[in-house]
Image (spheres, helix red, strand yellow):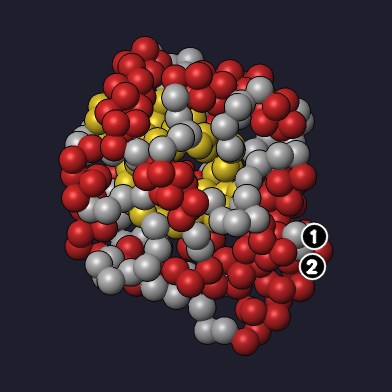
Amino acid sequence: MDWGMKNRLSRLIQRDGRAMFLPIDHGYFQGPTTRLEEPGKTIAPLIDYVDGIMLTRGVLRNCVDPAINKPIILRVSGGTSMARRDELDQEGIITSVKEAVRLNASAVSMSVFVGAPGEHQTLLNLARLVDECEEYGIPVMAVTAVGAELEKRDARYLALASRIAAEIGARVVKTYYCEEGFEKVVKGCPVPIVIAGGPKVDSELEVFRWVYDALQKGAIGVNLGRNIWQHDHPVAMAKAIRAIIHENATPEESQQIFNAAKSESKV
Ligand code: 5RP
């Protein structure tokens, strides 16, 4: 691995081998998602607690202070929308690698839709993107996307999609947590795995349990959005999840951190 690639990855994955990424890219197909209507305001109180933010060039340019000292994971795939839910898997590459360099991205991310009609197209997109990014020492994070088919998220499917993304050359894979067999997903994927959260759930303890269990089973961290910034107490959520990732807090300890942070903070 050359110096630039190592340097970018080390900005994202911390010295303890763990990572907490905050995705705010949802608008690229969902439009002004609840509590992400003004992305700059959403991330302002959270930025100190995360190791990187994932977003599109439009939000980066217009809503984020260029003096920010956090690594950027630039989402470069898209071209679909919730208005055509059945075609969410038909993504293309919408941002060039040259633009990623210009924006000083530490990594780029894109979705692959294994098992969907767009499988072939999105896997080839990944292959081309990896070829180009490797030339410039930019890591590619592959997102194993399921579109609206959330029920697909079992170990067999996630292991298949994650392994294929790593085989094609992703340096990091973002996938989902699953209660049964997540260790098989990690074991079968030769690059680091981070988990997303999916739609917001009602109980914060449930989120802490996923994150804790995923780390016990080998994930290096999270790329977790809605269960942080759609929560009524996003800062408390960010502090509690950070404690699991970087201080090995248990779900119960995280709940206490959450409770304490919630009572002392307005957000
Ligand atoms: C959308 C994405 C999101 O970044 C990813 O799903 C993580 O966000 P959340 O925790 O809200 O699911 O890649 O395709």
Cα distance, mark 1 to mark 2?
A: 5 Å
Which mark identifies residue 253?
2
Q: Secondary structure at mark 2?
A: helix
Tell me where residue 122 appears, x and y as whole percent: 35, 21
The residue tagged 1 is: 250
Q: Is residue 230 visible?
A: no
* Viewer can see residue 188: yes
- Residue 95 quadrant: top left
The front one of 45 and 71 is 71
Pointer 1 with pointer 2, Cβ within 8 A: yes
The residue at the point 40 percent across, 63 percent down is 70
- Image vertical order of residue 40 relative to residue 263, above or below: above
Which one is nearer the viewer's eye here, 140 or 152?
Answer: 140
Provide residue 251's location: percent of width, then percent of height.
Answer: 77, 59
Q: Residues within 10 Å of mark 2 (few under 14, many from 20)?
A: some
Classify mark 2 as within 8 Å of ligand 1 or not, answering yes or no.
no
Q: Secondary structure at mark 1?
A: loop
Q: Residue at x 35, y 27 (%)?
A: 130
- Find residue 80 and name its label: none
Is 161 rendered above or below residue 30? above
| Residue at x-position 54% and y-position 51% | 13
In front: 4, or 190?
4
- Is 264 above or below relative to 191? below
Q: Amino acid at mark 1?
A: Thr
Estimate the x, y position of residue 22 in percent, counting from the top left: 47, 56
**153 on left or right of 54:** right
- Locate residue 141, reporting x and y percent: 44, 37
140 left or right of 213?
Answer: left
The number of numbered discs placed on residues in the rendered structure image is 2
